[in-house]
Amino acid sequence: MSATDDADFSPVGVIGRVTVSIPSDGPGEVLLPVRGGTEAYAAWSDRPIARHTQVIVTDRTSARSVLVEPLPTT
């Protein structure tokens, strides 16, 4: 694996799970399915999101940081 592998991967649209609650004014953490496993990413949102909530990635701010929204419930 090269250093560019993370930069080439776009997690936008990937569904993950919050492992560290996301406050409205700082990052939390999400686990995302990546390359056959799961990896932790720093996660930001414009509103608080509780631990264990399923989320969808709406944007990537860096190789290891993402913006997320709660997955709509049906």
Image (cartoon, rainbow, N blue to C red):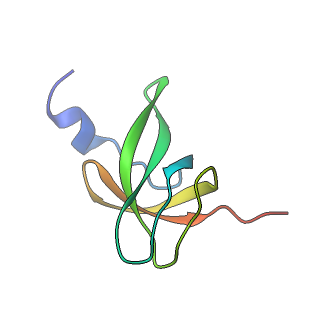
- Spot the residue most to the right: 74
Q: Residue 57 at what x, y percent from top left?
A: 49, 58
Nearer to the camera, 62 or 7: 62
Q: Residue at x 53, y 72 (%)?
A: 48
Quarter of the figure with the C terminus: bottom right
- Measured along the vertical axis of the image, is residue 53 above or below residue 70? above
Up/down of 5 relative to 73, above or below: above
Q: Provide residue 16's location: percent of width, then percent of height.
A: 56, 46
The quadrant where residue 61 appears: bottom left
Q: Position of residue 54 (x, y in %)?
A: 64, 53
Q: Please indicate whether residue 53 sits to the left or right of residue 48 in the image.
A: right
- The residue depicted at 39 percent of the width and 40 percent of the height is 40
Q: Nearer the viewer, residue 22 or 60?
A: 22
Give left or right: position of 51 versus 34.
right
Residue 35: quarter of image:
top left
State the residue at coordinates (58%, 54%). Answer: 51
Indicate left or right for 17 with 39 as reference: right
Find residue 63 and report its horizontal and vertical position in percent.
25, 49
Residue found at the very far left of the displayed protein: 3
In the rendered image of this protein, does residue 46 appear above or below residue 64?
Answer: below
Picture quarter with the N terminus? top left
